[in-house]
Image: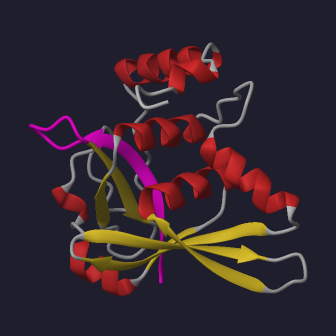
């Protein structure tokens, strides 16, 4: 297993679909690109900025329920790639000190890890099959091949977008998240 971190959520050039980028923390600093839906991208953005909402959204609710039963999310693992879909597992420590593994969608698992602040790991088989080399991914700060390379400060556009998202989330109500099917 290799530890990975969220490098950001963006869009593939020429597409409007959100892409979650995970970056290997050490070694080859490879990237995993996971296509996710707009609701998942929003939930991940809320977790990244630690938005405090009047009522918990689904990911926070799930973590609160896990904790209410005396368990704790201790790690998330991207365990397999099946027919182009990433599979993940939640690693839980139970109240009696035991452990349990729960299958999850990769986007949900990563969002839970960001909320919890726990490690995200990727199986070497997943990285070998799906990873992009560090120099193949364009990021705001540029390629980060060297661990000692300082991160470039976010651009004003990125900071403005984060602030806009914070304001929108702080003013959001549960009705804002209803769909036509609700």
Protein image colouring: secondary structure
Asked whether residue 147 is in view, the answer is no
* Left or right of 79 on screen, residue 32: left
Give the vertical position of 154 relative to 67 (above or below): above
Residue 79 visible in image: yes
Figure label count: 0
142 vs 114, left or right, is left
Say if 2 sits above or below 168 in the image.
below
Q: Quadrant of residue 46?
A: top right
* Residue 4 within the magenta-colored segment of the rendering: yes
Is 6 magenta? The answer is: yes
Percent coordinates x, y for residue 147 in the rendering: 43, 62
Q: What residue is rendered at 50% in x and 56% in y?
A: 108
Nearer the observer, 25 or 175: 175
- Taking depth in this image into account, of 69 and 146 the one nearest to the observer is 69
Q: Where is residue 31 shown, x and y percent of the image?
A: 30, 63
Magenta-drawn segment? 1-17
Residue at 82 percent across and 59 percent down: it is 67
In this picture, is 139 found above or below 133?
A: above
Q: Is residue 30 left or right of residue 135?
A: right
Q: Residue at x 35, y 50 (%)?
A: 20
Instruction: Tell which of 111 and 152 is nearer to you.
Output: 111
- Residue 97 lies, in percent from the top left, at 86, 84
The residue positioned farthest toward the front in the image shown: 181
The quarter of the displayed image where residue 76 is located: bottom right
């Amino acid at each position: 297993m290799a530890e990975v971190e969220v490098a950001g959520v963006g869009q593939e050039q020429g597409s409007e679909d959100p892409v979650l980028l995970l970056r290997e923390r050490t070694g080859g600093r490879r990237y995993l690109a996971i296509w996710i839906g707009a609701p998942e991208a929003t939930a991940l953005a809320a977790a990244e900025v630690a938005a405090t909402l009047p009522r918990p959204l689904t990911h926070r609710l799930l973590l609160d329920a896990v904790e209410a039963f005396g368990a704790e999310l201790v790690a998330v693992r991207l365990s397999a790639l099946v027919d182009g879909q990433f599979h993940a597992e939640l690693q839980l420590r139970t109240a009696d000190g035991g452990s349990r593994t729960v299958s999850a969608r990769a986007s949900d698992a990563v969002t839970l890890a960001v909320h919890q602040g726990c490690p995200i790991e990727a199986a070497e088989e997943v990285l070998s099959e799906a990873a992009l080399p560090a120099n193949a991914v364009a990021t705001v700060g540029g390629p980060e091949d060297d661990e000692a390379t300082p991160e470039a400060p976010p651009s004003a556009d990125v900071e403005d977008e984060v602030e806009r998202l914070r304001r929108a989330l702080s003013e959001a109500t549960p009705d804002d998240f209803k769909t036509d099917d609700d």
